[in-house]
Amino acid sequence: MALIMPFIMLCKWRFGWSIDNKTGSFTLQNYIDILGRGYYRKAIYNSIFVGFSSMFGALLIGVPLAFFTTRFKIRGKSVISTLAILALVSPPFIGAYAWITMLGSNGWLRHGFESIGIPMPTIYGPLGMVIVFSLKLYPFVYLLTSGALSNINSSLEDAAESLGYTPFSKFIHVTLPLILPAISTGALLAFVLSLADFGTPSIIGRNFRVLSTVAYNLFTSEMGGNLGLASTVSILLILVSLIFVYMQRIIIRNKDFGSNMLNPPEIKKLTRLTTIPVHFLCYFIVFLSSLPSIVVIYNSFRNTSGPVFQSGFGLDSYRKVINNVPEAIFNSFLFSASAVILIVLCGTLISYVVARKPSILTGSLDSMLMIPYIVPGVVLGLGFIVSFNSKPVVLTGTAIIIILVIFIRRLPYSVRSGVSILKQINIGIEDAAASLGSGPAKTFVKITLPLMLPGVFAGAMMAFITAINELSSSIILYVGGTVTMPVRIYLSVLDGEFGTAASLSTILLVATGVAVYTIIRLTDSDERVFL
Amino acid sequence: MFANIKKPALFAIMGIMAIAPANLVFAGGKVVLYSAHKQAIIDAMVPRFEAKTGIKAEVIKAGSGDIINRANAERANPMADVIWSIGGEQLEASSDILANYIPAGYDKIESAFKVGTNWLPYTAIVNVFIVNKNLLKPSQYPRTWWDLARPDFKGRISSARADKSGSSYMQLATVLTIYGDNGWDVYKPILQNFVLSGSSSAVPRFVNDGEAAVGVTLEDNAYKYVQGGGPVEIVYPEDGTVAAPDGIALVKNGPNSKNGKLFIDWALSKETQEFLVQEMGRRPIRNDVSASGDLPPLSAFKVVPYDFSWSAGNKDLFRNKWNEILIGE
C-alpha cells in the first residue's frame, strides 16, 4: 500500500500541476461570465437533463437484464454478456455515424418505418442523445448489478419468501436494498460518462449544447483555445459530477448490510409461460445495443470508391488495412492489458482503503480520482506531454506514457466497483479473521479479496473495454511504433475512408469480443458465478 | 484469473520499458514529420523522399488541431522537425514554435501565397460549397455566400465551427473580406442557418449522405466525394472565394533540423508539386507548375485576396463576435 500511494499521488500531482500550468492565471471572472450567460446556463441545464435521462435509461435497461441473466437459466448467457459488454466498444465517431445512417434525416431505417406509415423522429437532438447514451452506457449498470446479484446471501431472500413476500415485493424490499450500492455505482458511472462524453453530442446533438462539447471546443481549437474559459467549464462539469458522487455516497452510507455470502442464490428455471418473453427481452436489449456495430460490420464489406460507398460487396476494405493491423492490434491489447493490471492492483487496494478506512483523506482521494475520468482525454494527454517531455523524466514517444494515461483515466472503474462490492461484504468476517490472529495483509489476501472478486472482475472488465477503445489521449501521444487500433480507425475517418474505418472497427470488435467471451467462459466454469 | 495473468503481463510491461525505439540505419539519418495528409498520400510520398535523399522519414499523422496542440505542448523539447500540410491559419497562430526558413526555389513560389510568418505555402486550397444533387435542383443551389442566408436553407447547411476549425474561420474571414463593412450583417444570418459539426471532415460526408443539403468546405475535401461518384457537386461562390495556402514549416529547435530543411526543399520542388497536383486535387503554389485538368483554373471563378496577418491579428475579436451571435440566438 505504502509503495503504491506515492506513485498515485505523484501521477495526480503531476497532471494536476500541468493542467494548471496550461490554464495560467485563475480568476473568478470566468465564472461570472459563464453563469451570467443564458448560453452557458442552458448548457449546464442541458447537461444535467441528458445526464439524468441517460442514467435512468441505462438503469431501465441494465437492471432487468442483470436480474434475468443472473437469476434464471437463460440460453446463451455468455453470448448475451459478451454482446452487452461489446456495446461499450463503440468505435470512435463511426458508432454515432452508424446511428445517423439508420435514423438521420436520410436514414434507411427511418425511411423504412415511414414507408409503412410509422413516422419516426430523427436521431438528432436531446432525445437521440439520451437513446444513444442509454444503449451505450447500460453495460456499466449491467456488469455491476450482475456482480452484486450473484453475491447476495440467498438466506435473506428465502426468509422474505417464507414470511409471505410476493416475488415483486421481495425484490423491492430485500434484494434491491442489498444491491443498491452496485446499482447506484453503475448509475453514477453512466451519469458521469454521459456528462463527460463529447463525441456523441457533437455528432448527433447538432445545435443542442452541452457542457462537454462547449469545453472540448474551447480546449481543442486549432488556432489556440481559450484555456481559461475551457477550464472553467470543465471545473463546472467536475463540480456537477462531484455533487453526484457525494449524493451516491449518502445513498449507500447506511447500506452496509454485509451479507456473509455463504449461501449464493440458486439459478431458477423459467416456467414455460415466462421463458419466451424473458428470452425475447434479453436478446432484444443486446440486439438494440449491437445495432451500430452491425451497421459497421455491414459497411466493412461494402465496396467503396474513395470516401463514397458503392453498390456491391467485397473484401477490399480489409485488403487495404491488413498489412498494418497486426502491430496495431498487438499494441491495443498490450497497452490495455498492462493498464488493466495496474488498475486492478491499485484500484482494489484504494477501494479497500476508501470503503474500510473512511477519513477526510481517503474521501478526498476518492473524489480526486474522478477528475481524470471527467476531463477530456486530449487535455489529459497534453498535460502528460507538458509534464513528461523534459528532464528528469522523458516519457513522450514511449508506450509507458500511453499506459499511464489509460491507467489514470480508467482507475475509477476499479475503485468504484471495489467500493460497491465491499459494501456488500460483512466486515465481521474480517474482524473474525483478525481475532483469530491473521494480520491485516493476510486477512485482505485470504478473506476480503476472494469475496471481492466479482466486483474486481466487473471493474477490470469495464476498464479493459474502455482502455482498448481509448482514442482521445492516444492520438496526442502515439508515435510510429505505438499506434493502436482506435487511432488507426480515427485516422481513416479523418481521411474520409469509412470503408477502411469500418473494416478496422470490425477487426477490433471481433478481437475484443473473442477476448471477452473467453474470459467469461473461463470464469463461468470456475464454479463461481461472476456474470 | 489473477495468478494466470499477472506474471506474463508484468514481464510485458518490463519489456516495453526496456525496448528503446529501434532505428533502422539510413545513411542520411532521419526526419520526424507531423502531418495531416491523407494516409494514401503519405504512403505514396514518403518512399519517394527516402529514395531521393537517403533520409528515413517518420510520420505522425493526426488531425490538424491535434498536431498543432501536440507541437505546442512539446515546445520545451520538440519531437518534430517539420509540420507538413496543415492549414495556414493554424501555423500563423502558432508561429512562435516555428523557425524561419527560405527553401531552395523560393523565387518560384507564387508571391500571393508568401503570406506566412515562419511557415511556407505548400499547396493552395479553395473554399467552396458542396451541394447534394438529390436534395437540390441546380436552380436551388446557393451561388453566393449571401445565398447561404436564404430562409429555405435554415438547418440544412453543414459547417465546421469557426472557433475550432481553421478552415471554417477562414470562411468567416472570407465573407468579412468580400462584404467589408456589411460583413457581419451578411455572416450573422448565414451562421444562424448552419448546423455546426464538431469535425470539419464530416461536412462533405453529411452532404454526400443527404443529412445536409449544402456544406461549406475545402475544395480537395469536396473533390474526393465527386471523384468517388457521390451525389454531390462543387459550387464556386460567384461573389468570390479565397485560394489560400496550407502550409509546411520547420519546427524551432527540432531534433533533426538539417534534414527537416531538406524535406521542405523536396516538398516544394517542381517534381513533388507536380505529383501533388496529379494525385491530390490540390493546386500548386509554384508558378512553373500548372493545375490539374480536372479542376477549373483559378481564372474561371472570382478569387479575392486574403490577408493572413489581418485575419490572424483579429482572431480573438472575430471569434468573440462569432460566439456572440451563437450565444444570442
Image: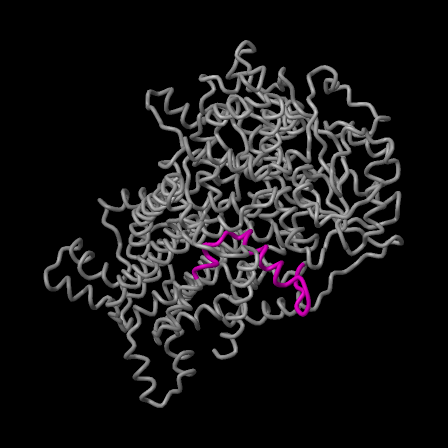
**Nearer to the camera, B184 or B45:** B184
Estimate the x, y position of residue A142 in percent, counting from the top left.
36, 53
Q: Quadrant of residue B74?
A: bottom right
Find out whether residue A495 is within the magenta segment. no
Q: On screen, A186 above or below A505?
A: below
Left/right of residue A278 with respect to residue B215 in the rendered view: left
For residue B102, which quarter of the picture?
top right
Which residue occupies 37% across, 69% down? A363
Identify the residue at image location x=60%, y=59%: A402
Between A283 and A384, the residue placed more toward the observer is A384
Does the rendering let one see residue A395?
A: yes
What segment is highlighted magenta in the picture? A370-396
**Observer-nearest residue: B219 or A102?**
B219
- How far across and how far down the image is residue B258, in percent? 85, 51
Task: Give the image location of residue B130, x and y in percent.
Answer: 59, 22
User: Which residue is found at the position 83% from the left and 34% from the top?
Assistant: B272
Of all residues shown, which one is farthest toward the top? B139
